[in-house]
Amino acid sequence: MPKALVAGNWKMNGLRAALVEIEKIDAHSADKSPDVLICPATTLLSEAAEKTTKIAIGAQDCHQNTSGAHTGDISPEMIRDAGASYVILGHSERRVDHGESDALVNDKTQSAWAAGLRAIICVGETLEQRKAGKASETVAHQLRNAIPTGATADNLAIAYEPVWAIGTGLVPELNDIDEMHRMIRAELRDIGVQDSDETRILYGGSMKASNATEIAAIEDVNGGLVGGASLSAEQFCPIIDAFSN
Ligand code: PGA
């Protein structure tokens, strides 16, 4: 079983005053068994990296190029230079807000790896796709197209985030999470991800202290990608604890 990864996605939240929460999460994470990651806004990356010693810091997106005329974008090298080690790619909010395709996520992942970042690729079905019985098909298609060759358990994690569960308080039935994570594991094997059984598959979508323990008990759930409940140490630390052995 891979070591769990509990990741917080701060999205477009958090001013410098919120760095104190990251420091509290860092202090809490000493001697805990899961790896812990916080992905704050780009403006906080370097300060967050400077203030932490136990947890990893990551970005929420990157451009596919190393540098150049791309106003407003951030390259993987810049993220690495700021002291971060992870980047979230293909989050459903980026797929919707910015029209990101699996092909673009694939390109971004290759650039992230070239800069020495680990990638967390997000996949997940909409409610319409689930109701139409197409959840597995949708996610398998995303995995096959978004994951580049050269993926390993070290440079890749997958976050399964049903779009309808993000920020809504709705969570799938535990057996649905179980089924999707098994399917994702099988796809990772098929795709030829190196050490696929050790590759972390995170669950994301309205995870909180009150449901983290039962979700963490599912065999192929190897961590969480947490949005709202990662913004305060008080809410996030019990989730870290739920993934501690
Ligand atoms: P949520 O967001 O925990 O607020 O549902 C999860 C995510 O989008 O990564």
Image: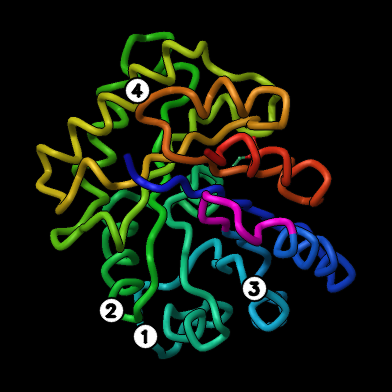
Q: In this view, does 39 lie to the left or right of 4?
A: right
Residue 35 position, x and y percent, is 51, 55
The mark lying in front, picked from 1 and 4, is 4
- Mark 4 CB within 8 Å of ligand 1: no
C-alpha span from label 1 to label 4: 34 Å
Q: What element carries label 2?
A: helix
Spatial CA distance of label 2 from label 4 is: 30 Å
Spot the residue most to the right: 17
Q: How far apart are marks 3 and 4 (CA)?
A: 31 Å
- Which percent across, then down, holds residue 238? 72, 39
Q: Residues within 10 Å of mark 2 (few under 14, many from 20)?
A: few
The residue where tag 1 is placed is 66
Residue on which disc 2 sits: 114
Residue 213 percent coordinates (x, y): 60, 26
Determine which quarter of the picture holds residue 165: top right
Q: Which of marks 1 and 2 is nearer the N terminus?
A: 1
Q: Residues within 10 Å of mark 3 (few under 14, many from 20)?
A: some
- Name the quarter showing ligand 1: top right
Identify the image quadrant of residue 154: bottom left
On the image, numbered disc 4 is attached to which residue?
A: 180
N-terminal of the pair, mark 2 or mark 3, is 3
Q: What span is colored magenta in the figure?
A: 28-36
Query: Badge 4 local density, few (<14 within 10 Å), some, or many (20+)?
Result: many
Nearest the viewer among 36 and 76 is 36
Amino acid at circle 1: Thr
Q: Does the residue labelled 2 lie within 8 Å of ligand 1?
A: no
Q: Which disc, if any, is residue 109?
A: none
Q: Do the residues labelled 1 and 2 touch (CB within 8 Å)?
A: yes
Magenta stretch secondary structure, dominant: loop
**Marks 2/3: CA distance?**
20 Å
